[in-house]
Image (cartoon, helix red, strand yellow):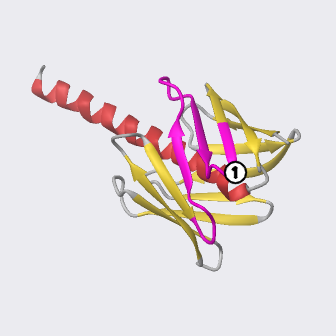
Amino acid sequence: MEKVVNWTKGIFDSSYQIFCNGQICGNLMFETWNNNALGIMSQKNYHFKCNGWFNTTTTIYDDTHAVLGTIQFNFWQLRAVASLKDETPLSWNYTNSWLSQWTISNYQNTNLQYKANSGTGTVIGQNIDHELALIVGLYIKEFFARILVAFIMFVAIMVIVRGV
């Protein structure tokens, strides 16, 4: 049976609040100058550690520093694969050209569909209780959004500097 989870995020903020049945049930908070983040769901903490802005791998840890999985990014295709410990890998990709809808799925028992609309969004799908998959889907989206903003800023600076 499909369930729905909602989330909110400030337009220029990188912190997500996740709502289950109208109550806050989780958060995802990014550090300001890097792609490290802390996800909190059901009193469990998930630490996302990325080595540098353009590193293609992020490692997920719990509070005891045990590795829970990794995320491998493909910048050119705007896709990612999350390999969680003892689970079938999850494939993440955008599903529309406006980059406002995306999915994360293992094509078996986990299939989450995300829809965003100016700082708010919903997650619909099977096995939505898989809280790590839910947070990973939001983490990857924000990771790509930050890379896209950095690229646009780089191009703008190059245009200004070169006077093109």
Q: Residue 155: image x %, image y %? A: 24, 30
Going by the image, does 128 lie left or right of 76? right
What amino acid type is highlighted by mark number 1? Thr
Going by the image, does 136 lie left or right of 145? right
Q: Quadrant of the N terminus?
A: top right
Q: Residue 17: image x %, image y %? A: 71, 44
Is label 1 in a helix, a strand or a loop? loop
Q: Is 37 contained in the magenta span?
A: no
The residue indicated by pointer 1 is 110
Vertical placement of residue 126 versus 68, above or below = above
Q: Which residues are magenta?
A: 84-113
The outermost residue toward the top is 164
Residue 156 versus residue 116: which sits nearer the camera? 116
Going by the image, does 95 lie left or right of 119? left
Q: Residue 53: image x %, image y %? A: 36, 53
Residue at 64% from the left image edge and 64% from the top image edge: 46
Going by the image, does 72 lie left or right of 3? left
Vertical placement of residue 111 versus 131, above or below = above
Q: Is 89 contained in the magenta span?
A: yes
Residue at 76% from the left image edge and 45% from the top image edge: 126
Residue at 62% from the left image edge and 48% from the top image edge: 105
Residue 79 versus residue 26: which sits nearer the camera? 79
Q: Quadrant of the C terminus?
A: top left
Vertical placement of residue 136 versus 1, above or below = below
